[in-house]
Amino acid sequence: MKIFLRYCILIITLLSVINANSLDNKAFNEYRKNHYTKALKLYLKSAQDNDLKAILMIALFYEKGLGVKRDSSRAIKLYKLILKRTKNIKKLIKNGDYKRVYISIEALKRLYIITGDREYFIIMKRLKKLYNIELNSQVIQIDSNRDDYLILCPDAQVIALEDREGIEQFDCSLFGLFPKKMAKFMHLRHLRFNLLNSDSKKRVAILKKINKEINILIKPMIKHLEKNVIQCYVNAKSMDDIYSCDYDYLLKSDPMFFTNRAYKFEQYIVGHKLKNYKLTNRQKSILITKLKEQIANNSYGKNWKSMVK
């Protein structure tokens, strides 16, 4: 009888895990299609089973106002909830629960960006260092199960293992929309970084060739991001929405964080307490026209061309 009960518990546990993964995949697919309301509903179902990734995504939706009214205070509560449920980080690392550790790091990063509280940044840095030391001490081979960014972005599997350094800085949707281009771009980017630190006599000539290829590859990605920000302006109902559009574009179009303009922009908004008000159709039309002009003369935000000197 005991064996039968254990068997039943095991089956129920497995079914709940399969169901959670299924919900998560559906939610992510809706998120990738910009169907934020549908994605949020699915993530809320997953969160009922204490799925930390679902809680992280729900917090992000509230932080950005995706499929729900923007609510920074609720986002902060959810990020803090994740930290409460991952208290013993050393134990998680020791047990190899890298998914929960990675999600904790993401929660700390978002809390730092929203609140500007440097304590979150310090804890995040310490945690990352501890996390990396543990990985290095075990000489862990990076694979699809170990590369933690794939937890949040399964489409990134198109990138070769050796080219994944810094992959988490890129907008996840790009890996699904431009798989071949992103794979080649990430490979060239990897080669470029290696060359910058080499003493090869052919270094300058090879870099010039790589930069030329990168310029060609990034054009459709930049156009995609620009198209998205224009649509974001079209959907905007208030100035707060416009600020969110700008922040999102800055974050996605400068994935290398050369100047971290997205963070600086957010700090500017907080520091200057910019007024939020509902937009009239005329005001929105003026803003969209101005945005298109800035995009046309390459003065809007900062794009990947900053990679190429």
Image: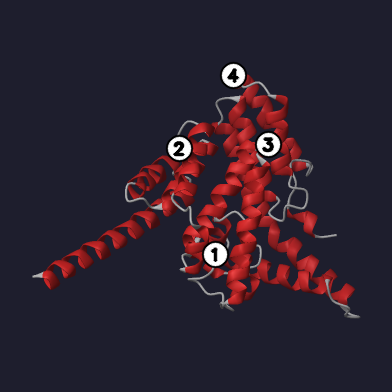
The residue carrying pointer 2 sits among few (fewer than 14), some (14 to 19) or many (20 or more) residues within 10 Å by Cα, namely some
The residue carrying pointer 3 sits among few (fewer than 14), some (14 to 19) or many (20 or more) residues within 10 Å by Cα, namely some
Measure how far apart labels 1 and 2 are at the Cα level. Answer: 24 Å
Residue to which mark 2 is pinned: 67
Q: Quadrant of residue 41?
A: top left
Q: Is residue 88 above or below residue 6?
A: above
Most extreme residue toward the right is 201
Residue 126: x and y in percent read 64, 57
Q: Quadrant of the C terminus?
A: bottom right
Most extreme residue toward the left is 1
Measure how far apart labels 4 and 2 are at the Cα level. Answer: 22 Å
Residue at disc 4, secondary structure: loop
Residue to which mark 3 is pinned: 266
Which of pointers 4 and 3 lies earlier in the amino acid sequence? 3
Q: Amino acid at mark 4?
A: Thr
Q: Which mark is residue 280?
A: 4
Residue 53: x and y in percent read 44, 53
Measure how far apart labels 4 and 3 are at the Cα level. Answer: 24 Å
Residue at disc 2, secondary structure: loop
Q: Is residue 43 above or below residue 159?
A: above
Q: Quadrant of the N terminus?
A: bottom left
Residue to which mark 1 is pinned: 156
Q: Amino acid at mark 3?
A: Glu
Residue visible at 38% across and 52% down in the picture:
51
Q: Is residue 17 above or below residue 283?
A: below
Which of pointers 3 and 2 lies earlier in the amino acid sequence? 2
Task: Using residue 197 as the reference point, say whether residue 126 is left or right of it.
Answer: left
The residue carrying pointer 1 sits among few (fewer than 14), some (14 to 19) or many (20 or more) residues within 10 Å by Cα, namely many
Which of pointers 1 and 2 lies earlier in the amino acid sequence? 2
Residue at disc 3, secondary structure: helix
Residue visible at 57% across and 20% down in the picture:
278
